[in-house]
Amino acid sequence: MEIHQLEMLRELGALGSVKAVAETLLVTPSAVSQQLAALQKTVEVPLTRKEGRNLVLTEAGQVLADAGAAVVSAMADAKMAIGAYHGSPVAPVTLSGFHSAGQALFAPLARLLDAPGRPRVLLSDEDVAQQDFPALTARYDLVLAHRMDHSPRWPGERVAVLPLAHEPLDVALPAGHRLAGQRAVTADDVVSEPWVTSRAGYSPADVLSALAAVSSRELNIVHRINDYSTVAALVAAGGVIGLLPRYTARPVLNPDIVLRPLEGISTRRRIDLLARPENLKRTSVMMVCEALQTIMTELVER
């Protein structure tokens, strides 16, 4: 039993002929007859009867037509409701972000959207391996994700991608380190240093894998820690060096740390917003996207 079949049955009761129904609904009379016949197959009692040249409703047909009118009306209300939801600038938006993005972006985003007529953002942190970010779009309207330049692209057939930044990972050194006075460092400069880095599958570990490959040396990795604030604290203590993102690590930096570019190795990661394509049709979701783009642009320029 289809909505358009119930609509045709209702119109037949109101207009009294298949031709009139066809003209009203802008279809052919044969299409009306076919749909009414298909509807008749779904019930055990006659819905229509011949009255001269016209086809009219039986009592059972009128009962179904009245019920169908309520269904059509409810569907119209549902379409209006979903239209209002899609167009609402204040509809809530769920957003997940990996830790360093959350540290840098969540508080400015909350401040920027803390005003009448702005969406309410529900924030979560999800620090997963790069290949696991797309799956998060099933649970969140927007997902802040990162991947290294050489990593596989996001699955464009399943998720929409809005680029936010192209961020280098810099070498984090204690302020008193022998290399702190250099403008940049090379693989030869740092290959023999003790390191704190992330677990495998995350950006810092990927960079160090490339560093080891370029140097043909096994690195001295002392700590495996994903949280950048902990990495920064360990580097500041003076026992190890690490990698920190140039833009989004600002909240965890302190005067005891300096950042230096690592030359000769690709260290850039792409920070993107991932979403199911249908979510980007919502006004409130796009308002959050625009706010994040504004905040990230300010971070990069700073």
Image (spheres, grey):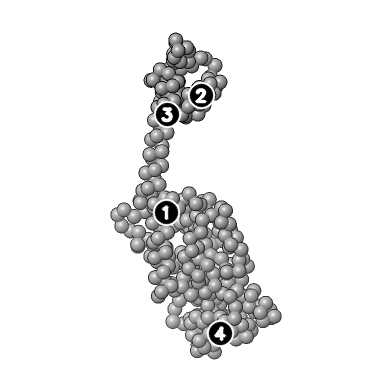
Quarter placement of the C terminus: bottom left
Marks 2, 4: nearer the viewer: 2
Q: Position of residue 27 (x, y in %)?
A: 46, 29
Mark 4 lies on a secondary structure that is: strand
The residue singled out by tag 1 in the image is: 285
- Taking depth in this image into account, of 120 and 82 the one nearest to the observer is 82
Marks 1, 4: nearer the viewer: 1
Residue lying at 51% horizontally and 59% vertically, measured from the top left: 161
Residue 197 in sight in this render: no
- Taking depth in this image into account, of 38 and 59 the one nearest to the observer is 38
The residue singled out by tag 4 in the image is: 185
Of pointers 2 and 4, the one earlier in the residue sequence: 2
Residue at mark 2 to residue at mark 4: CA–CA distance: 78 Å
**What type is the residue that disc 4 sits on?**
Val
Compared across the picture, whether 84 is left or right of 34 comes to left
**What type is the residue that disc 3 sits on?**
Leu
Of pointers 1 and 4, the one earlier in the residue sequence: 4
Marks 1, 2: nearer the viewer: 2
Mark 2 lies on a secondary structure that is: helix
Residue at mark 3 to residue at mark 2: CA–CA distance: 13 Å
**What type is the residue that disc 1 sits on?**
Val
Q: Residue furthest top?
A: 52
Residue at mark 1 to residue at mark 3: CA–CA distance: 36 Å
